[in-house]
Image: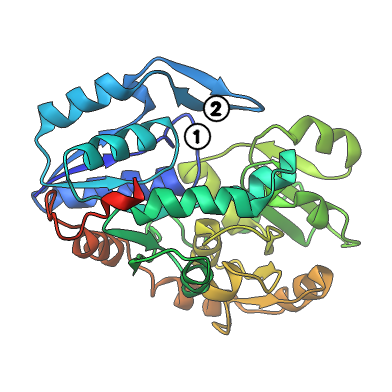
Amino acid sequence: MRILVVSDAWYPQVNGVVRTLEVIARLLRREGHAVELLTPERFLTLPCPSYPEIRLSMFPRRRVAAAFAAFDAEAVHIATEGPLGIAARRHCLARGHGFTTSFHTRFPEYVNARFRVPSDWLYAWLRRFHNAGTGIMVATASVRRDLAARGFRNILPWTRGVDTALFRPREKSFLAHLGRPIWLTVGRVAIEKNIPAFLELPLKGTKLVVGDGPLLPELKRKYPAAVFAGAKCGEELARHYAASDVFVFPSRTDTFGLVLLEAAACGLPVAAFPVAGPLDVIGGSGAGALDADLEAACRRALAIPAESCTAFARRFSWDACAEQFLDNLRPLSPPSLVNAAGA
């Protein structure tokens, strides 16, 4: 199959959306499919205000149309709701083409946290965007229920995976210079990740933050006792996971949290709030502790053996994720399924 994937999220961003799309494209190509990634790399871009690593494509309509014509796709997946996603959606609807979308991020909550725009307004726009397609792929059951209650239609399951060859238990001597226990969080250092809820906990040992983002300078000033290692990837990221003692996930808005699987695969128990994302991924798995009192969750997680975490992580396969994505795709031109009214 010839598959065109459109995403506004791409490098230099380092997040679950980018990693998922990159891995899925590689695995599908390995199986003989032709996968074209239409990303901001091909366009003139501007940095997103307060998120400079997020590149916003300028005037993409003509070049998106040219990319469609050049690739001659049999299926189209629109991964994001940014300028490229909007242009691709418009192109498909104008020609009666079916397309799938995916819901990766609780964008309304993020915008509300930063700019106080009412979430309901943004969900109304997102509902219009996604309901025009033939299916919306969602990672967890709780997000599926939430979107269905908000009027989103044709919701399809799409799980995630983890590379257990890279993310695996290792010697803890890598962080021997830090006092133990080491409480680690990994992710974008931004308001929506709720990192101060972690940094304010009265925990003995070392609080370690791996990641970069607009809130980093402020948090460094406010929490000088914490260790801020900056953004890490690949082998270096895996070594930080494996050398820590508990992975603390303070976010209340993530739809999945790929970092939860990466931490567990490295033998690291998870401490998190009992909210969508952690509830779906960790739940009663035995690989972590969920509690409205995050400090209590951290202390309980510290007693969880590494073997429970790695056994849990082995249940998540990128191959299964790629196969599910492929099964969810729809042919490019099924007129009976295209909801032109959603345009």
Side of 153 relative to 305 (left or right)? left
Side of 127 relative to 123 (left or right)? left
**Mark 1: which amino acid?**
Gln
Residue 169 at x, y = what percent? 51, 63
Q: Are marks 1 and 2 in contact (CB under 8 Å)?
A: yes
Residue topped by disc 2? 53
Q: Based on the displayed image, in which of its 4 quarters is residue 248 positioned?
A: bottom right
Side of 126 relative to 225 (left or right)? left
Residue 184 at x, y = what percent? 69, 55
In the depicted structure, whether residue 141 falls above or below residue 70: below
In the depicted structure, whether residue 4 falls above or below residue 326: above
In this rendered view, identify the residue nearer to me: 274 or 184. Answer: 274
- Crowdedness of circle 1 by 10 Å Cα count: few (<14), some, many (20+)? some
Q: Secondary structure at mark 2?
A: strand
In the depicted structure, whether residue 322 falls above or below residue 149: above
Residue topped by disc 1? 13
- In this rendering, does residue 35 appear at all? yes
Residue 318 at x, y = what percent? 32, 61
